Amino acid sequence: MLNDRDKYLLYSELAKLSEAGFPINNAAESILDTRPPSRQANFLKEIITGIESKKSLTETINSLSSGLSPLEISLINAGEKSGKIPEIFNHLSQYFNLKQSIQKKIKAGLIYPILLLHFGIILLALAKTAQSRDFVSEAMNVLTTLLIVYSICTIFYFGFQTANRKAQKSPSLDAFLNRIPILGKVRKSFALSRFTEILRTYLISSHSVSSSILAAAEASASGRILRCTKEKILPSIDAGNPVGPVLANEPDNFPPVFARAYITSEESGTLDVELKKWASVFTDEAESSSKKMGVIFPKIAYLLIVIVVIWQIFQMANIYFETLEQFIR
């Protein structure tokens, strides 16, 4: 299974080589010549096998054992249909580079709070042991407490991953996650960045407006944008109306300033230039919010853990005074 760093490196190399004119299978072979780690090598070999067996790139990645995310499959499919594979690889490379760097920053920031939490739990257990003289029982209590903490963290992590994946098709779940401070801003900015990037890619490749909008909505990985597209934007296009006014009536999905810019560029025939600019704006917003999340999240975790440790200290002090009182008696 490829991790985020593997994906960043692979997409970065594939972007450079495909931009230089290498077919995908030849680009994969060139990267294999550099002797990458086994995970990356297996991924590249499967791509070569799929392409050489006359499969499309989308069909090939759908059958990979590494199991790419729906987001990756959707973007690569859009890039293949529009003939803009290098741009899509570049977008994925930037996304996974930012993702793995933010995760690394959050993990580094959580090391001290986690050590502090363990210290507080063990310190309280030592105080209880001094009172009860039952080391085995208190040791089991410590292990049970830590197991509960680890279980809660694991459930939260995998629960969030599942919710984030389902939000790509569920408008209500997408809306719920977007209300979470900072995280919601990151998700919305990335969704709009993908939407504008894919829409521009399709339009400059001479695809119809309706097929371009639908591909962009699917690539956005936002359930709300996808529903808005299917229920409001596409019917409006089929009725012969422009897209801009529909976007302007959806401020929860599309920022009003972006909608106004879309309307004017749609009328002036400069939509490709405007979409390129907004893709960059939304990407910058996503990066800025992600970095802010990487700073704030460990601080929030640290504050919560300090509160827990202080509570443990008060409990320990209470045990100490109870023991002292028993000794005096």
Image: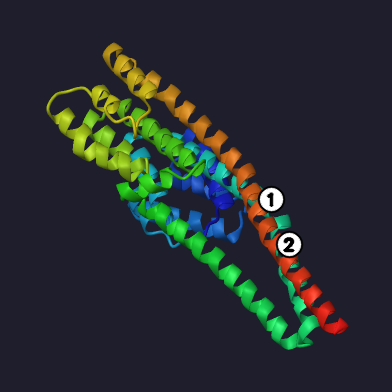
Q: How dense is the environment of label 1, judged by Cα within 10 Å: few (below 14), some, or many (20 and up)?
A: some
Q: Is residue 213 above or below residue 265?
A: below
Q: Measure the alpha-carbon separation of dots 1 and 2.
A: 11 Å
**Relative to 254, is 166 above or below?**
below
| Amino acid beneath label 2 | Leu
Q: Identify residue for label 2.
A: 115
Q: Position of residue 259 (x, y in %)?
A: 33, 23
Q: Is residue 32 visible?
A: no
Sequence-first disc among 1 and 2: 1
What residue is drawn where x is 73% and y is 65%?
314
User: Residue placed at 57% from the left, 34% from the top?
Assistant: 288
| Residue 278 location (% of width, % of height) | 43, 25
Residue at the extreme front: 329
User: Which amino acid, by three-letter code, is at mark 1?
Assistant: Gly
To which residue does mark 1 refer? 109
The residue most toward the top is 268
Residue 184 versus residue 208: which sits nearer the camera?
184
Q: Is residue 328 visible?
A: yes
**Residue 218 location, quadrant:** top left
Please give the name of the residue rendered at 68% of the width and 77% of the height, measured from the top-left corner: 142
